[in-house]
Amino acid sequence: MGARGRLDGMNGRVKSAPYVIVIGAGSTGAAIAHDLTQRGIRVEVIDRGGVASGTTGHNQGQLHSGARYAASDPESARECMAENRILRKIMSGGLEWNGGLFVGWTEEHMAYLRTFLDACGTCGIPAREISSTETLRLEPRLNARILAAVEVPDAVFDPYRFCLSFLATAQQAGALLRTFTEVVDLDPSQGRVTVECHRTGKRENLGADLVVNATGPWTGRVAALAGARVDVEASAGVCVTVGERVSNRVLNVLAPPADGDIIVPLRRTSILGTTSWPVADPDGIPVPDDHIEEILDMAESMVPGVRASGLRGVMASARPLLVLPGAGGRAASRKFSCIDHAPEGVDGLISIVGGKTTTARAMAEKAADLVCARFGWTAECRTQDMPLLSPRLGVSL
């Protein structure tokens, strides 16, 4: 079982701080480690790659205001806006608060304008319509045929630094981190997690009082190691990076979510994206050439001349979408769910699936609440107001 052992009686009275293994060092796993350590629970984070090496590290870097989902998924939109406000307080040094614009230049875009503004108002998202003259003053490279634009409080994050902020703060509180260490077998009812170090090839059995599965699109695969089931849709997406910052704000098309309708400025580059299609295997996702062209075409419609900025790179990753009846792909909700597998007969395992990097802290709060409830551990969440350490401090790997 490992040196750390297992507490006597999962449903009984806990005599000392529980020991929890969190699988996954992306945004969700990092945020869970931070939340649990602040509640006095001992934590070890394990990832088969490096920090943010999975979906988190391959996303577009847009910190959502929720405006993108206001009309189609208002619950998720409200959640994004709430977390946007919290992150402004606790991660001030790790984000670029540059704002966002939803821009329209066709009759279809103009027809959507009132729906969009009303939806933002209903969801409590600050949204200000501005004139085309002001829009072009703010972003002179935009399509000169712009008819309308709406300002929203979007922002930009570096995925790696986002995770480092949570992990550095968790490590200061005693959390451990193992990277390039893969979970190859899992028996949470016995408190056993078998891992293999990719650096040495050595296998080791670790002891845990509870395991949290925060592996994004791999959540179902990891749960299956323990004989549990998680239904998750792996929705692949392609992003294209060009070698120039073509805007100062996050640019969105004034329309329902579609492929290739966002431009995110990140340092001296711009990340264009993204597409969406279901994949069976989140590892080794191909990058279709037509997706790259589709993204570049849409970006060119927003910012003429973006192709001339030069292709710097392309990437693809899979979103872990929560499977709900009658919805998938672009129609899928960005909601999340925490699953206690005890009713399936798999005690000691909790999985979390769905959500977005923007809502990682909220996801962690719900997961930590469930962990504490399992142990009868009384400790309130502190992460809404606690400033995170600078990602520049780094973490011990």
Image (spheres, rainbow, N blue to C red):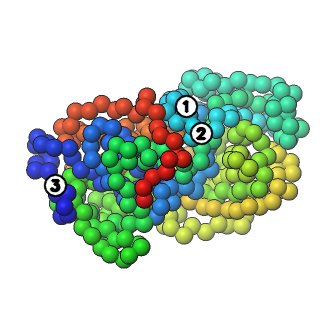
Residue at (67, 67) in percent of width and height:
288
Of the 4 image quadrants, the one containing the C terminus is: bottom left
The image shows residue 102 at horizontal and vertical percentages of 72, 35
Answer yes or no: do the residues labelled 2 and 1 have beta carbons within 8 Å?
Answer: yes
Q: Earlier in the sequence, mark 1 or mark 3?
A: 3
Residue picked out by circle 2: 95
Circle 1 Cα neighbour tier, 10 Å, few/some/many (<14 / 14–19 / ≥20): some
Circle 3 Cα neighbour tier, 10 Å, few/some/many (<14 / 14–19 / ≥20): many
What amino acid is found at the position of numbered circle 2 in the picture? Leu
- Tag 2's secondary structure? strand
Q: Which mark is residue 147?
A: none
The image shows residue 381 at horizontal and vertical percentages of 34, 32
What amino acid is found at the position of numbered circle 3 in the picture? Arg
Residue at (24, 50) in percent of width and height:
19
Q: Along the line of sight, which residue is nearer the eye, 201 or 67?
A: 201
Q: Earlier in the sequence, mark 3 or mark 2?
A: 3
The image shows residue 137 at horizontal and vertical percentages of 85, 31
What amino acid is found at the position of numbered circle 1 in the picture? Arg
Q: Along the line of sight, which residue is nearer the eye, 238 or 184?
A: 184
The image shows residue 89 at horizontal and vertical percentages of 51, 29
User: Viewed as shown, does residue 78 lie left or right of 382?
Assistant: right
- Tag 3's secondary structure? loop
- What is the distance, in whole Å, between disc 1 and disc 3 at their CAs? 38 Å
Answer yes or no: do the residues labelled 1 and 3 have beta carbons within 8 Å?
Answer: no
Q: Which mark is residue 88?
A: 1
Residue at (10, 48) in percent of width and height:
9
Residue at (43, 28) in percent of width and height:
385
Whether residue 147 is visible to the viewer of this picture, yes or no, is no
Circle 2 Cα neighbour tier, 10 Å, few/some/many (<14 / 14–19 / ≥20): some
- What is the distance, in whole Å, between disc 2 and disc 1 at their CAs? 8 Å
Residue picked out by circle 3: 6
Q: Along the line of sight, which residue is nearer the eye, 333 or 190?
A: 190
